[in-house]
Amino acid sequence: MNRPPSIRRWAGAAAVALLAPHAASAQSLTLVDAVDAALRAHPSVAAAEARVQAAEGAGDAARSARLPGASLDATLTRFQEPMIVAPFHSLDFSNPPTFDRTLVQGRLALAYTVFDGGGRSSRIRGADALLEASTHGRADTEMAVVEETARAFVGVLSAQAVFEAADAQVQALEEEAGRAQQRFDAGTAAELEVLRSQATLQEARAQRASAEARVGLAERVLARLMAVDPASVSATRLADVAISDTDAPPQTPDTQRSPLVLQADRAALAAEARLAEERAGRLPTVQAGAGVLDYGTLDDKHVFEWQAGVQVSWPLFTGGARSASVRRAEAELTAARMELDAATLRVAQAIDAAETAVVEADARAEALDLAVAQWEEVARIEALALDAGSGVQADLLRAEAGLFQARAGYARARYDGVLSRINLARGGGTLDRDWLDEALEITP
């Protein structure tokens, strides 16, 4: 079974840094490597592939009806009294029929449906439509795994960035706590400044502990998707990701390219074929057959003859079963069409949400990037002023807290911009390995 090359490029060296811990220091794990490993290991991808293979088998079975069928039957019957064991076509007293208690019969038969009201072609169309639906379903499943893995990967990067910001805050507050203790020991500061700096430091340490715990959780989520040991992810450096061109607006996706919409569309086509098949049951069926028959006994007295014929079958009354099947097929077609409209609506809503998220994340990242630079300058000035004796410790502590919030917010906003574009690509049906290579800038 050939896979779409845009999604299923199995890289043999995917997640090598995780599978070979000794090489973790020599190379980093990229998002593309993580996606390859997740696609290879995720059970939903294997299930989607199995559904495609099942649909292929159903299509082959439906198309086999275009060929004649052949069957070979054999029976052996033991009677209480001797029985005619050969065809009795005429009455000839000079050559009486053979009687025996054991009858051996064999039959080689060929049968072909000449006309069935279009039911056969409808079944083939339905099977082909279901195969296409399962193929699009597989693509949607793979996109979901790509999106989920990217979210987990970026989640680790975002959690690490927040932890780094929290750690930097702790280091700055530890320095201030040390300076406050020195000023108190020198008699130039009140004990209140020492207590205030220590309390603020403990709060920062609590924030760092929370950030560190979130890093561990994010690493475990990514490791489970990749089916590797979480300790391997913890010991491996993740390559940073960013949007290749943040100034270029993302292309507006087309809902009709979404595999979810395409899957629902092919399901509607399959329902149409099913309705045509049920309606074909109102017409007669014409079958042609031929065969070779063998009659004989166990002592090798056998007679062979051939037969051929045409059979017409037309159920005139089925107790309402035929019309009920047609009504059920009509209802299923209506449901399939409504599900197509619902899928189109869901994809359109997801695209709208992703486009809004892109704009919001970019605006937040731009504003918070400036805020980081400003808070850094404020913290530097407040520290100098406090050392010079003209500053207020509370102002420095507020500046350090503001700097941490700005750094953490900027990291989240930057990675939210990556995820929102990934969500937008999935909504438009373009999310695959090639898109990751083209749209993202990976920094080893």
Image (cartoon, rainbow, N blue to C red):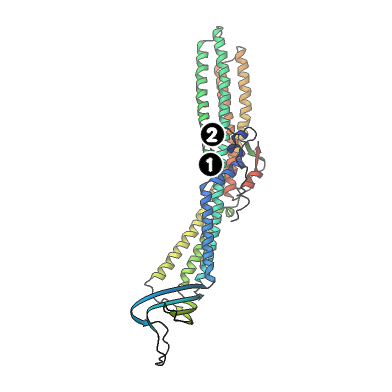
Residue that label 1 marks: 227
Residue 167, horizontal then vertical, whole percent: 56, 25
Asked where in the image residue 231 lies, by quadrant, the reply is top right
Q: Determine the residue positioned at 53% across, 46% down.
A: 42
Q: Disc 2 versus disc 1: distance between alpha carbons?
A: 12 Å
Q: In the image, what residue type sits under mark 1?
A: Ala
Residue that label 2 marks: 231
Question: Tag 2: Cα neighbours inside 10 Å, few (<14), some, or many (≥20)?
Answer: some
Quadrant placement of the N terminus: bottom right
Farthest top residue?
187
Question: Is residue 16 in view from this perspective?
Answer: yes
Secondary element type, mark 1: loop
Question: Is residue 260 in view from this perspective?
Answer: no
Q: In the image, what residue type sits under mark 2?
A: Ala
Farthest left residue?
80
Q: Determine the residue positioned at 50% across, 25% down.
A: 206
Residue 374, horizontal then vertical, whole percent: 63, 26
Residue 435, horizontal then vertical, whole percent: 63, 46
Relative horizontal placement of residue 166, taking residue 322 as reference (left or right): right
